[in-house]
Amino acid sequence: MKKELISRVEGHGSIGVKIKGRRVESVELDILTPPRLFEKLIVGRHFNDVPTIVSRICSICSASHRVISVMAIEDAFGVQAPREAVLLRELLLHAETLESHGLHLFLLALPDYYGYSSFVEMAKELPDAASLGFKVKGIGNRMQECVGGRAIHQITPVVGGMSAGPSSEGLKRIRQEAEPLIDEVLRFLSKEIPTLQYTPLVKVSNWVSLAGREYGYTGGYILINGKEKVQIGDFYQKFHESALPPSYTKHTLYGEEPFMVGALPRILNSGSKLKGSAGALLKKLGITKSRSTYMNNMAQGVEILFSLERVVDIIGELLDLDLPEGQDGGIVTEFSPVAATGTAAIEAPRGMLVHTYTFDEKGYVAGGDITTPTAMNLSDMERTLMMMAEALIKETPDIKPALETLVRAYDPCISCSVHIVRL
Amino acid sequence: MTKAKEKPRLGLYSLTSCSGDILEITNLEEDLLKLLDLVEVVDLNVAMPATGLSPDIALVEGAVTQAEEAGLLRGLRKKVKYLVAIGTCACTGGVVARGPKKRKGWLRDVYPETGGDFTSGFPRPVSDVVPVDFSIPGCPIERNYLMHCLGYLLKGVVPEVPNYPLCMECKMKGNECLLRYRGLPCLGPVTRAGCGARQPSVGRPCDGCFGAYEDANREALTEIFRQMGLGEDEIKKRFDLFWERG
């Protein structure tokens, strides 16, 4: 079996395909980023250190890890963060989505559509695509810096609320930048973008995301295939994990079946709730009708618009609230730790993310479990890779580039998924 | 006709990490374009296939946990003029380099089916494997600090960096002292300046990710923590989050 490293994904992974004659015997996706054992590192630590440690799981999704760990701890202690803090955290999640989708769609995925080996090559001939990617990613970074205190490994989300509010000047600048960007992204994505020839070969079979009254990255319950509702606290009853050698990552299954998480499942479950330019673009792209796994890339485009529009609204709301800035005071609810377990789920850019922690009465961690979206997607990646390999091997022995584009469509974040643990 | 002078070649390498330091480099935005005018990037494994050219300056993020990673470093050491550790993981092993004796058991607990077979070792700093010419700390690194250091290295000069505590930057910003006036266990007094006091500026005590400056007085700060009522275990956990090797 030959294994080759995949480039243009975050972290290190490889695809192994076993071929006998013209038949594909097996497909295996290995995650080679070594284990860092985060769930063990937090045991015995004070709850205040948990968000600081677990945000280091991944630099791209550090805001998601920080916010969700804070929410899981609040669930354990029965704390309700003030509404202003909840809004600020939402803003941070939109910021991260912009940064992450901007990087993935424009700089890592689009080169496949236009036939370039990397964004560096693409930028030479299509400077618009690359520069729009940098703009979307850039506004996401500046927002994370403004609201979170740093573009990577944010500081402000704390158990009970936020340690500080952002500067109103900073918020105004971001709003000024976001408003024209909505039109620019809509124009670019409404243009003819070449279709990847493999698009019809793979379809989503099971799709899972959080859902609620409105479209968003937080939600009241887990929705499976647009029909079945599962309470967040029941995640571990419906989904289970197993690790298969030689990969360092655990696979997560829905019952016994693979499932997909990410922008496409969110759109399939809740896209009908989208309004504004995000809603308009969704109608134009035919994502729901196609249900091809590759449509995850375009679903990210729709979400870039959704997030930009939401950012403008949230900033308007926050500016009316006159929040304390910088060191002037936190936006926090008072609380005391209790011995309990808490679970929370969030939609990180690349899909549902679940954190759960158990604390002793002084607020020290007894155990924890983190299930990342890439771990959830792993089995589905193997399912669709097999479909693709079987379809393509009849035509050409060189199936590697096609399989790489498929893995990239999932936007895997391999450093995230590598340390899934049970205690 | 003489050939235009070739630009110095830069290689970026990611070992066991969250990739946050290289992500910070891509976050340079306009400064990134300036940097690309000055250097040719010959290797960046998260975003492009390798060119096969050897770099003059290698920036390495992440801790060493694999034999392949150690091999990559030894190979680089022979080729490059400057091997630079970037980010706290590469400098000290970082937040993941904890519990050296417990690690085998952790692997088996976490991966019951496969944990015993893993070849990954305890996270080590780059300097445990090969000599490092320069270290740029931070979790993540600070973009300005990095650009400042690269400016020196491109001229062939060892960079001059702050060798004083974070408190200096905190004072310059006009912040209220969190240690003195809010009773928060801030590591600013023993931590190298360079981030502009990011955490204290948003009301949170410094966690010490830049590590110690020369002559940092750990004992004096330990005594202050004791007087604030922190237990010995709590004090140890403050220092070993990032500031000192686990």
Image (cartoon, coloured by chain):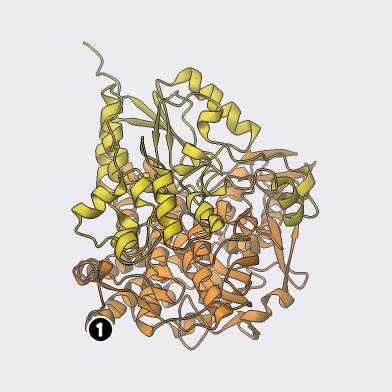
Chain colours: A orange, B yellow
Task: Quickly name the residue at label 1.
Answer: A321
Image quarter of residue A333: bottom left
User: Is residue B121 or residue B147 the one in the foreground?
Assistant: B121
Q: Is residue A295 above or below residue B242?
A: below
Instruction: Give the position of the C terminus of chain A as an image quadrant.
Output: bottom right
Q: Is residue B246 above or below residue A209?
A: above
Q: Is residue B124 left or right of residue A349?
A: right
Specify the farthest residue to the bottom.
Answer: A213
Q: Position of residue A37 (x, y in %)?
A: 64, 53
Residue at 47 percent of width and 84 percent of height: A80
Q: Is residue A213 left or right of residue A332?
A: right
Q: Position of residue B86 (x, y in %)?
A: 42, 38
Report helix, strand or loop for mark 1.
helix
Q: Position of residue A269 (x, y in %)?
A: 55, 80
Q: Position of residue B79 (x, y in %)?
A: 47, 19
Instruction: Give the position of the N terminus of chain A as an image quadrant.
Output: top right
Crowding at mark 1 (Cα within 10 Å: few <14, some 14-19, many 20+) = few
Q: Amino acid at mark 1?
A: Leu
User: Is residue B149 or residue A211 the one in the foreground?
Assistant: B149
Image quarter of residue B66: top right
